[in-house]
Amino acid sequence: MQRPSLAPLRIDPFLLWLIATVAGASLLPVRGSAATLVDILADCAIALLFFLHGAKLSRDSIRQGAGNWRLHLLVFASTYILFPIVGVTLALLIRGWVDPVLASGLLYLTLLPSTVQSSIAFTAIAGGNVAAAVCSASLSNLIGIVLTPLLVALALHVDGSGGSAALHSIQSIALQLLLPFVAGHLLRPLIGGFIDRNKGILAPVDRGSILLVVYAAFSAAVVGGIWTQVGVGDLLILLTLSALILAIVMGVNVGVARLFRLPREDAIVLLFCGSKKSLVSGVPMAGALFPAAQVGPLILPLMIFHQLQLFLCAALAMRFRRQQEDGAHPTALPRTEAEISSAAAAIGLPIDPACMPGVVANMALLDRHAGIMLASDGKGPA
């Protein structure tokens, strides 16, 4: 019997870097003119990050995935309808039980766009529709530059000025995120080859940018007294509530994929792209939307959720990959009436309509037993 591997469940080193960054900001926060300099460097780093994201985006990938509108609409609905509904409902349920700033942070993370790189990476590992994942994740981020500030203004009442505040936030976010992204994409014909050849060298820019922004945000939060407000109990509550949000969204997406009878490759895209929230976009957006002293505690739930989603999605992606590899030699059994009718017609075997319910039930039973046998031995039945 093949032993299950624990490799996909190992701790992401980025989590350790995030913890170290928060600890460093807690012990040595920047203040005064040094804080201003760090903020400027963080803004430049984020602009460079989105410039590189734009330069990495292939137009061929966009063209390949753009036609799958039903899938893109489902991912959009998960990101900007399902998540906010879960967030608002949860915020109402925990009112008075959780620190208001942390509760706002939980709600804020549900209003953010999906991730790009990790969604595409996990989709590729799991054997999903990579072209559609590229299109859905990129579209989610671009829409989020406008939609997230509007949702935040609506759900969190960031500023009494309402629409004008949201418009100012959109302009600020567009200048910092959208403009570099578009510039990078337009320059891809000139620099795309260099970017593709040097992904390993440029990769640290992604995480380094986030770490710099987190350091700046938590420095301001520490100066404002965050650790006198947030304790270990609060962190455990955030972890539990983040896991609950992720479980609800993933469960609904699995159900939606079955309801719409999505192909396996598209169902994987919906699961991964539709259940992620972007730390890369969320941190700089928080800086544009909220007072500096509140950014640290507000992004704390997002940081926890980000690592939780990476951990779970890595495990799921590897599981789907193993299932795909195991299913390469045994043929998948037909389950629905349409699949059974098609398979029967292919071998010239007529099925009486009155017998179809019984055939469907028997095929489901056989499929379940086959799954149990395959799970008990990584090499399949002897």
Image (spheres, rainbow, N blue to C red):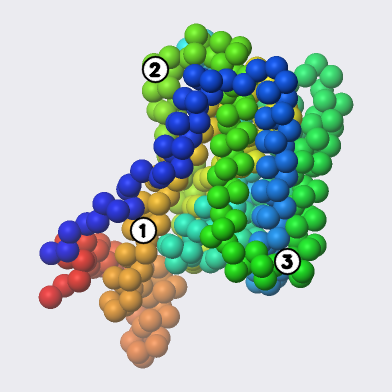
Secondary structure category for the residue under label 3: helix
**Residue at disc 2, secondary structure:** helix
Query: Which residue is depicted at the point 50% across and 39% down?
Result: 306
Residue type, mark 2 in image: Val
Quarter location, residue 126:
bottom left
Give the alpha-carbon distance from disc 1 to disc 3, as whole Å. Answer: 33 Å
Q: What residue sits right under mark 2 in the picture?
A: 232
Q: Residue furthest bottom?
A: 348
Q: Is residue 87 visible?
A: no
Answer with left or right where residue 163 lies relative to residue 249: right
Q: Position of residue 30 (x, y in %)?
A: 62, 21
Q: Which one is nearer the viewer's eye here, 265 or 238?
A: 238
Say above or below: 365 vs 341. above
Q: Position of residue 231 (x, y in %)?
A: 43, 14
Question: Which of disc 3 and disc 2 is earlier in sequence?
Answer: 3
Where residue 337 sits, quadrant-wise, is bottom left
- Residue 142, image x, y percentages: 72, 49
Left or right, 159 with reference to 309: right
Q: Residues within 10 Å of mark 1 (few under 14, many from 20)?
A: some
